[in-house]
Image (cartoon, rainbow, N blue to C red):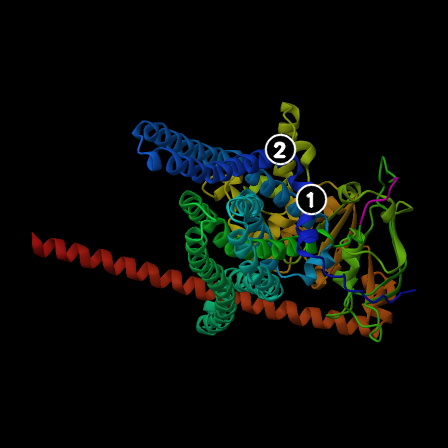
Amino acid sequence: MIVSTTAVPKPRLSTFRAIARLYPYAKPAMPRIYLGMVAALLAGVVALAIPLVLQVLIEGSLQSGDASGILPAVLLVLALGVLEAIMIALRRWFVLTPGTFIEARMRNGLYAKLQDLPVAFHDRWQSGQLLSRAVSDLNLIRRWISFGLVLLIVNIVTIIIGFGVLIYWSVWLGLLFLVTSIPLWVYGYLFEKKYSIIARRAQDQQGDLATAVEESVHGIRVLKAFGRGKHSLLKFADQAEMLQGTEIAKARAIGGIWFWLVLVPDVTFALALFGGVALTAAGELQVSELFAYFFTATVLRFPIESIGFLLSMTFDTRTAADRFFEVMDEENTITDPAAPLTIAAPEGRLAFEGVEFRYQDAALTEPATLARIDLALEPGETMALVGITGSGKTTLTALATRLYDVTGGRVTLDGVDIRDLSRPELRRHIAMAFEDATLFSASVRDNVLLGRPDLTLSDDPADAAEAERVLAEALDIAQAAFVHSLPKGVDAMVGEEGLSLSGGQRQRLALARAVAADPAVLVLDDPLSALDVDTEALVEAALRRVLAKTTGLIVAHRPSTVQMADRVALLQEGRITDIGTHSELLQRNEHYRYVISSLEDEELAQIERLSREKKLAEEEGRRREDFERESHVIERRNGEVSR
């Protein structure tokens, strides 16, 4: 039974609580962060001590005319300046390494989470949004922890200490500074509410822009082939313009708080000057105290003005933290059991028992993608899945490796519910090759042996020899001998997603990868669709040797693939409507005959297309040979004329 649940939106945390969630990642580095704060605070205290020295100098040597006290005071001010510079350098030294450590730890955690989350999560999320979180958001968090957090706390403490010093010299002037700062705190509160919304919009739009770039780069061949580069550029320009408008709105918001942060201190200085002169004239304030007051106020000017960009940086970081934890808080619905079972010697009996499946975003009013699937594969048996497009073949194969979890019924391997196995063990026993073959930016060897960490991660020479044997056998079965003609053979680097290879070459390497895993069950989701007929025949002949000792579940889009199977399961609208041998279904099932005839039409169309491409290639080769022959004749004639 499928239960409908309505997601309850999480309450929005305060900025402090949202950022405090970063503490577990920052905890190991916090001792150095604290030392950086202490160093920065000492630098601020030293800066505030200089006005005290100047006050003593004015009240002593300058008023008495005794020059003997000037040099010691100057040297003391110089020493305090040097000490302040040393403290600032120490602050930078303390916080530099911890920030990078925290960023690396968070990025590793995010990557691990993305690897652990089910395919259903990646179906919903754009890759550009994930990329922007892993790069720009974490970079922003690092800079805030190393710089913004330290200065924000230290500058606030410095301002409080400075207010205390100002009140010490003059209660009235100190209160003047305190009262005139109230508008800044009020505006800062309003600024948070406005800026947080704009900052979130900007960072989401950056993710959309990253997605657009990624899609255009990966689809560059399609865009060029259809002449849609300009269309893609216009779409990208619209998104970039939206982001530009949001960034301008951010700049205006920051400009607004900067206006007040610059204006209020200037107004305060003017009022303090007027009041200080009046108090001095009335004899309530000494000239030395007035001088020290304004020097202290000047020292406090940077901490006060810095609050603007530190607040904007803090709110940006809060947004980045929210975006980071949106991923980290995602519930993984496909997890390992608390006490997983094991299958020591898998035989390969795969069974679907009353399996139902509905995609997460599917409406309850829509029919289930798969409904009441009952199908059993005996050890060593090859089963072909046949059906028209949309009948549920690919979805059924994805359930076997828990890329998705069933929403009803169960899938078993040797009688054990696959949900009772750990995912690593399940995927050691069941390997899968997809129609859309994905390769990684690594060597051919690493791509093919991806599912054999027991061989590739071992330093044992025997394992290395076994890895070479498995590699050679898998390449032979997949008819992938073309790799030996690459510049570095099996050590040749495959370009991003294997785009440097043809579709058929990528599919053969993906098939070799599945075969090399040496599974008990081999699931093939039409992995031969990009092969020509001759190569497909060779691959199928080699696959028969593998499938003779391995249970096989194959999505078939060609009659030749169907004929590899011991039995065939016919899917129709998410249900298995018939099971039998190819000849049995041809005799008794009209829908099966229709599907097979459709597959034959597709196969004939592909043969004709490949034949045309072959003829065009041969004609192009002949034209190239004629051109080269004529070029040689012309060069020879030119040589004879020159002689």
Q: Position of residue 16 (x, y in %)?
A: 67, 52
Taking the spot 62% from the left edge, 55% from the top edge, the residue there is 318
Q: Is residue 6 visible?
A: yes
Relative placement, left or right, of 290 versus 337 is: left
10 Å crowding of disc 2: few (<14), some (14-19), many (20+): some
The answer to if 336 sits in the magenta stretch is yes
Q: What element carries label 2?
A: helix
Taking the spot 32% from the left edge, 27% from the top edge, the residue there is 68
User: Which one is nearer the viewer's eye here, 507 or 495?
Assistant: 495
The answer to if 394 sits in the magenta stretch is no
> Can you say whether 461 is above or below 593 in the image?
above
> Can you say whether 256 is above or below 170 in the image?
below
Q: Where is residue 123 in the image (x, y as percent from the top left)?
A: 69, 61
Q: In which quarter of the image is residue 29?
A: top right
The dot on residue 603 is none
The dot on residue 515 is 1
* Residue type at the position of mark 1: Val
Marks 1 and 2, Cα distance to the nearest angstrom? 51 Å
Earlier in the chain: of badge 1 and badge 2, it is 2
Query: Chief secondary structure of the magenta span?
Result: loop
Q: Which residue lies furthest to the front in this view?
A: 282
From which residue to which does the magenta span run? 335-339
The dot on residue 31 is 2
* Residue type at the position of mark 2: Pro
Pointer 1 with pointer 2, Cβ within 8 A? no
